[in-house]
Structures are given as structure tokens and as C-alpha cells.
Amino acid sequence: MARREVLVQLDDELIERLAAIAAAEGTSRSALLRLGARAVIEAADLAAADAQLVAAYRRQPQDPALIQAAARLAAETAPPW
């Protein structure tokens, strides 16, 4: 995948901490920032999925009888640890 350079302004403390982590991990600050960007995107995707799930349950609430039946079935089929 092609990469593009992006200007990011960071304070000195953040740069020093990133440099220390990068050195300890044997990688670059840029690689760490890419990982961080991916983590932010993944967190946003998960939050959006959670919001969709909540909205779906608001549109179609769970049936209490279904929940009781599922709990009963789980109790009957769960391994006896």
C-alpha cells in the first residue's frame, strides 16, 4: 500500500516517549504512530458497531421469555466445571 507523508505536531514529551518506546521495540516512531492510528480507527469502528447494536435493541427489544429460555438452555448444556 502506498504511503503518504503527513505533518503531525507533537510536544517534546510525547516525542521523547515515542522515541523511547520505539527504541525498546526496535521500530520507528512512524511505525508506532501508524499502530496508534489503526487503534483509533478500530476503536471508532467498534463504537459504531456497538451503537448499531444498541439501536437495534431499541427498535426490537429482547423478549423476556426468550432470555429466560436461553438462560435455562445454557444452564442445562454448560459443562460442569
Image (cartoon, grey):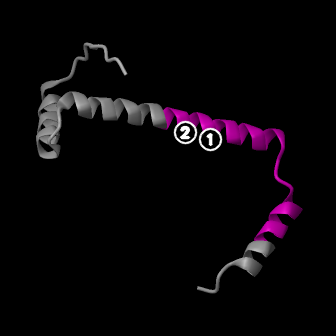
74 on left or right of 32: right
As drawn, the residue found furthest toward the bottom would be 80
Residue type beneath disc 1: Asp
Q: Residue at x 82, y 47 (%)?
A: 61
Q: Is residue 6 above or below residue 13?
A: above
Bounds of the magenta segment: 43-71
Residue 64 sits inside the magenta stretch = yes
For mark 2, what is the residue? 46
Q: Is residue 48 left or right of residue 73?
A: left
Which quarter of the rendered picture does the C terminus lie within? bottom right
Q: Are marks 1 and 2 in contact (CB under 8 Å)?
A: yes
CA gap, disc 1 and disc 2: 6 Å
Relative placement, left or right, of 46 versus 1 is right
Question: Magenta stretch mostly in which secondary structure?
Answer: helix
- Residue 2, given in percent of the width and then of the height, sits at 34, 17
Q: State the SS at label 2.
A: helix
Residue at image coords 25%, 32%: 31
- In the structure shown, which secondary structural element does the residue marked by tag 1 occupy? helix
Please say whether residue 7 is one of the residues in the magenta stretch. Answer: no
The structure residue drawn at horizontal position 85% and vertical position 61%, both measured from the top left corner, is: 66
As displayed, is residue 76 above or below residue 46?
below
- The residue at the far front in this view is 1
Q: Nearer the viewer, residue 2 or 12?
A: 2
Using residue 74 as the reference point, say whether residue 51 is left or right of it.
left
Say which amino acid is labelled 2. Answer: Leu
Residue at image mark 1: 50
**Residue 39 lies in quadrant:** top left
